[in-house]
Image (cartoon, grey):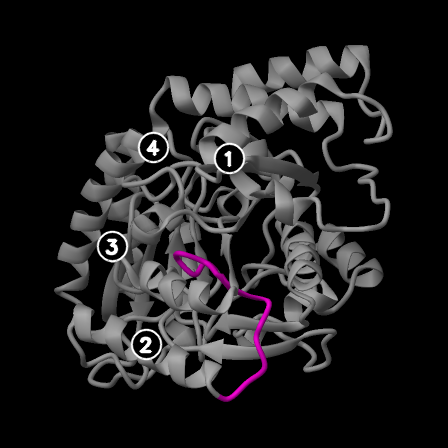
Amino acid sequence: MSDLYDRHKAVLPDWLALYYKDPLEITHGEGRHVWDADGKKYLDFFGGILTTMTAHALPEVAKAVGEQAGRIIHSSTLYLNRPMVELAERIAQLSGIPDARVFFTTSGTEANDTALLLATTYRRSNQILAMRNSYHGRSFSAIGITGNRGWSPTSLSPLQTLYVHGGVRTRGPFAHLSDSDFIAACVEDLRDLLGHTRPPAALIAEPIQGVGGFTSPPDGLYAAFRDVLQEHGILWIADEVQTGWGRTGDNFWGWQAHGRSGPPDILTFAKGIGNGMSIGGVVARAEIMNCLDANSISTFGGTQITMAAGLANLTYLLEHDLQGNARRVGGLLMERLRAVGAQLPGVREVRGRGLMIGVELVRPGTDEADPDAAAAVLEAARDGGLLIGKGGGHNTSVLRIAPPLSLTVAEAEEGAAILEQALRSVQ
């Protein structure tokens, strides 16, 4: 393992983040489990950053990919592509956006890039509203709208970005308010902001902030925002890269918890739909999607082999009601972790929805983030056979839990027990 780590460091960038003091090489997986190069088995509660959505080595997806690879792997968007059209038809129907058009990319970063291109072109404005503590990808434009310092290596940007309150419920100047007063204060802040600036193109927001530590506002905030945005013609972009496909349990899309004023104008997706294959995309009303006045293609977006995987994965997800499983098993897991957290002074909050759960750690007796404890718990969980993630706002002190949506009750109990032991070991 040390030889591979040395080779990694010799040819890859220093800023390419790796988990663990002794980095882990994963060689294969099955169901909700993976194995490392030494043969050790782990329960996977992070799924390749919320990307292995249904299961590792899902036979239905493996079969679809193998059969497609035996026919043709790739032809580009310059030719008609049946799997791409079929997946686009299904996503357009599921999106909730009327007269929807779908454009496929290879990642969530690229999807958000495309959404920004569409919004700024449609609105003839390069000003974007984004949420504090947000993350939207690693490209130049996506970094320019990311409100999380830990993932923002430059302040240079092709966009002018203004950051709005509301993405984090339990911190910040409005944290002490009730849910209804919190929403009212954030809306008033948005109205005040719009009174001091030129008309923005769009507001982009994650319904639940992923890298930011699985934080979210009260249900209905973005619906209230949308009412204000529509008064000014400003578009709403829902970044569903992490919240899509039923992961939140209660809804198929995260925006549906804020759907009182209708669907977003633009929706971006990626990660889980490919179950590990590189699929991202954008859904938008036809008038927005078709606003570009120059040619464009996507060499690898929508390629046949990834579309075959997406179709098989989406079919499995829907036929096995994995959204319902995320709601049921995620609710049990959340309840179990909250019971543990209530006994530990270093656990500030257990939050989330469905199988998207964050455990925020602080220094006991304070409200200060404790990134050292988060790193220690990550290591202890690994030692116990459990893989989790981490994230957070001002400092990385939130444990991120997002298993494949086929997680069983027994596996949820097993993972919770390992995590409890890991948490107790660092208190």
**Percent from the top left, x then y, of residue 297?**
83, 40
Choose mark 4 or mark 1, whichever is in front. 4
- The answer to whether residue 25 is left or right of residue 316 is right
Q: Which residue is mark 1?
A: 34
Q: Which residue shows up at 59% across the image and 50% down it?
A: 24
Residue 186's disc is 2
- The answer to whether residue 99 is left or right of residue 243 is right
Point out the residue furthest to the bottom here: 196
Q: Can you say whether 54 is above or below 172 in the image?
A: above
Q: Which residue is mark 3?
A: 420
- Identify the element where label 2 is drawn: helix
**What type is the residue that disc 1 sits on?**
Val
Magenta part, dominant SS:
loop
Q: CA distance from mark 3 to mark 2?
A: 36 Å
**Percent from the top left, x then y, of residue 2?**
69, 55
Q: Can you say whether 326 is above or below 294 in the image?
A: above
Mark 1, residues whose alpha carbon is within 10 Å: few (<14), some, or many (≥20)?
many
Q: Which residue is mark 4?
A: 323
Give the magenta part as a residue range.
196-210
Choose mark 2 or mark 4, whichever is in front. 2
Q: CA distance from mark 2 to mark 1?
A: 42 Å
Q: Which residue shows up at 63% across the image and 59% down it?
A: 119
Which residue is nearer to you in this view: 364 or 288? 288
Which residue is nearer to you in this view: 409 or 99? 99
| Residue 63 in view | yes
**Percent from the top left, x then y, of residue 319?**
39, 17
Q: Earlier in the sequence, mark 2 or mark 1?
A: 1
Q: Earlier in the sequence, mark 2 or mark 4?
A: 2
Q: Can you say whether 299 is above or below 159 in the image?
A: above
Q: Earlier in the sequence, mark 3 or mark 1?
A: 1
The reply to whether the magenta stretch includes residue 202 is yes
Q: CA distance from mark 3 to mark 4?
A: 26 Å
